[in-house]
Amino acid sequence: MTISTRFIDHEHDGTALQAEFAADDAVAGPRPGIMICHNWAGRGDNDGRNARRLAELGYAGFAVDLYGKGVLGSGPEENAKLMQPFVDDRGFLQSRLAAAHAAMREQPEVDASRTAVIGFCFGGLCALDMARAGLPVQAAVSFHGLFMPAGNLTSPKIDAKVLILHGWDDPMATPDDVLAVTKEMTAAGADWQLHAYGHTAHAFTTPGANNPDMGTVYNADADRRSWLAMVNFLAEVLD
Amino acid sequence: MTISTRFIDHEHDGTALQAEFAADDAVAGPRPGIMICHNWAGRGDNDGRNARRLAELGYAGFAVDLYGKGVLGSGPEENAKLMQPFVDDRGFLQSRLAAAHAAMREQPEVDASRTAVIGFCFGGLCALDMARAGLPVQAAVSFHGLFMPAGNLTSPKIDAKVLILHGWDDPMATPDDVLAVTKEMTAAGADWQLHAYGHTAHAFTTPGANNPDMGTVYNADADRRSWLAMVNFLAEVLD
């Protein structure tokens, strides 16, 4: 196994974007490509690390940049400011995701017919929006994601298989929000699963997260369990 | 691998009971023991099959008999009649489960300090009740189980790790019931998870179940996914 990484510059709607890509040189030929959608802070070290972990599993990992090359939030206030325009204009978010997906599929290591998306927090919303918008991914995985439906889409039908990994005490996605997203996924005809983890807050996969007042707390059990659930799910859908 | 099976006769409160046991002769020494709790029809072929599948994984499988040696329901009406006394007297159910657990722990192949329980439908209720009653299992897994709390226990604390595998369209455990059991498990301090499967009814692991009017329908995807989730969970907790 020899994991190679590189940055991939591309563009959407006049904005320069830079994704981080990882693949195993020892794998011959095109393999499934997995998009990794960042949380509200922008593409960070953890996203690159997850691209490499996916590469170690034999996939190509593509950690997208939705905010713009080098654009990173420095804290909750700035993060929220960066995220909000995409939450407010879901059609724009979906077109940016489509551009990132196209950039990933152009990579020679990627089998363009077998792709998936995973995402964390805001990135979980992105993963679900790719499914909602009918972007051609086979699987969408949300880790402690936001569930707000996409107002720009009327009664979307979902072909991608969906796995939602959720901390039950997440203040940003309450039990009422869970009920709403299960209704939405069912109405959309999606093959969906939702794994709920007890005593688990938002940001449970984010190393170092430890802000109980904000409801963002790393949880080693939920981190390990959710990653394993994703691994099995991707194997089921893509291999 | 050489899976050996035998029937184990034991007794509780004057009732003769007969469990079905399976273990791999090629495994040396005591190994974790997994109780399998039957659905409302009584211990059936599928329970013995699951005991053998668990033996193939290196565990000892012990398919319990809660109704009495040879007692099997022939259809919904008789099944309900057999189940109801245990649902009505949860203390009695728990003492019968304790007797079965003791009989399993006496088997030479079983490491009495490492045990778990899995159960299906009524058996899912049994699995949760073992956790609720503080019977010394490390893990409890409910497949399309019933969630009604145990009225004989006041504010139970749960030490066992709990995994609930649930079809979202199960008419015997509605979304309201799901919310209630998550509250109960959280208040009990349990390390709990709940995996919900969309477009999935009750009895999703029961081969041949196909009664949409009753809400009992086999689902191959949910069957395979839930079994894999159980395998990973048992490995995490017991190995």
Image: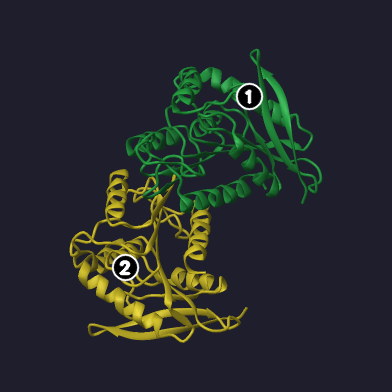
Chain colours: A yellow, B green
The front one of A27 and A90 is: A27
Disc 2: which chain? A
Residue B188: image location, x then y, percent = 47, 32
| Mark 2 residue element | helix
Which dot, 1 or 2, sits closer to the camera?
1
Q: Please give left or right for residue A46 compared with residue A85 in the image.
A: right
The front one of B54 and B78 is: B78
Q: Type of residue at label 1?
A: Gly
Residue A160: image location, x then y, percent = 36, 64
Residue A132: image location, x then y, percent = 28, 64
- Who's the residue at 52% across and 44% down the image? B207
In the depicted structure, whether residue A24 falls above or below residue A212: below
In the depicted structure, whether residue A49 falls above or below residue B178: below
Q: Please give left or right for residue B93 compared with residue B62 in the image.
A: left
- Who's the residue at 53% across and 58% down the image? A228
Q: Type of residue at label 2?
A: Met
Determine if residue A211 is in view.
no
Q: Which residue is mark 2?
A: A130
Q: Which mark is residue B70?
A: 1
In the depicted structure, whether residue A220 falls above or below residue A51: above
- Please, which residue is most extreme toward the front here? B74
- Please, which residue is most extreme toward the top here? B14
Q: Are marks 1 and 2 in contact (CB under 8 Å)?
A: no
The front one of A78 and A144 is: A144
Residue B110: image location, x then y, percent = 74, 37
Disc 1: which chain? B
- Who's the residue at 46% across and 18% down the image? B88
Q: Quadrant of the N terminus of chain A?
A: bottom right
In the depicted structure, whether residue A190 falls above or below residue B169: below
